[in-house]
């Protein structure tokens, strides 16, 4: 995973869990994966927005 665009020493770890894939088609699996990725993006953007609202410490 690349750290391009991030501060040195920062990492983002994520985990995607998709259940009940047995017997599903590949397209159904891809749809579930796309939904999970979209949810993660939304959550990260929400977190970014909240973090930007936190007052920065004066240096």
Image (cartoon, grey):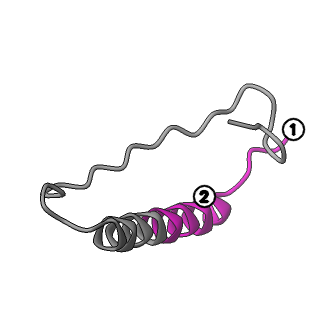
Q: What element carries label 2?
A: helix
The quarter of the image holding the C terminus is top right
Q: Residue 51 carries which label?
A: 2
Q: Specify the segment rendered in magenta.
A: 40-59
| Residue designated by label 1 | 59
Which residue lies most toward the top here? 9
Question: Which callout, 1 or 2, points to the residue nearer the camera?
Answer: 2
The mark nearer the N terminus, 1 or 2, is 2
State left or right for residue 18 relative to residue 31: left
Vertical placement of 5 versus 11: above or below?
Answer: below
Vertical placement of 46 versus 56: above or below?
Answer: below
Q: Which residue is drawn at 13% across and 61% down?
A: 23
Please identify the dominant SS of the magenta region.
helix
State left or right for residue 19 relative to residue 11: left
Residue 44 vs residue 1, the one in the foreground: 1
Q: Residue 7 carries which label?
A: none
Vertical placement of 15 versus 38: above or below?
Answer: above
Q: Which residue is drawn at 36% across and 73% down?
A: 27
Q: Which residue is drawn at 67% across and 63% down?
A: 52
Please identify the quarter of the rendering in which residue 4 is found. top right
Please identify the quarter of the rendering in which residue 55 is found. bottom right
Q: Which residue is drawn at 29% across and 73% down?
A: 28
């Amino acid at each position: 995973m690349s750290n391009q665009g991030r501060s040195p020493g920062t990492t983002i770890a994520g985990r995607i869990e998709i259940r009940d894939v047995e017997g599903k088609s590949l397209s159904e699996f891809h749809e579930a994966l796309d939904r999970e990725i979209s949810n993660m993006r939304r959550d990260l953007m929400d977190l970014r927005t909240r973090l930007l609202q936190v007052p920065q410490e004066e240096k």
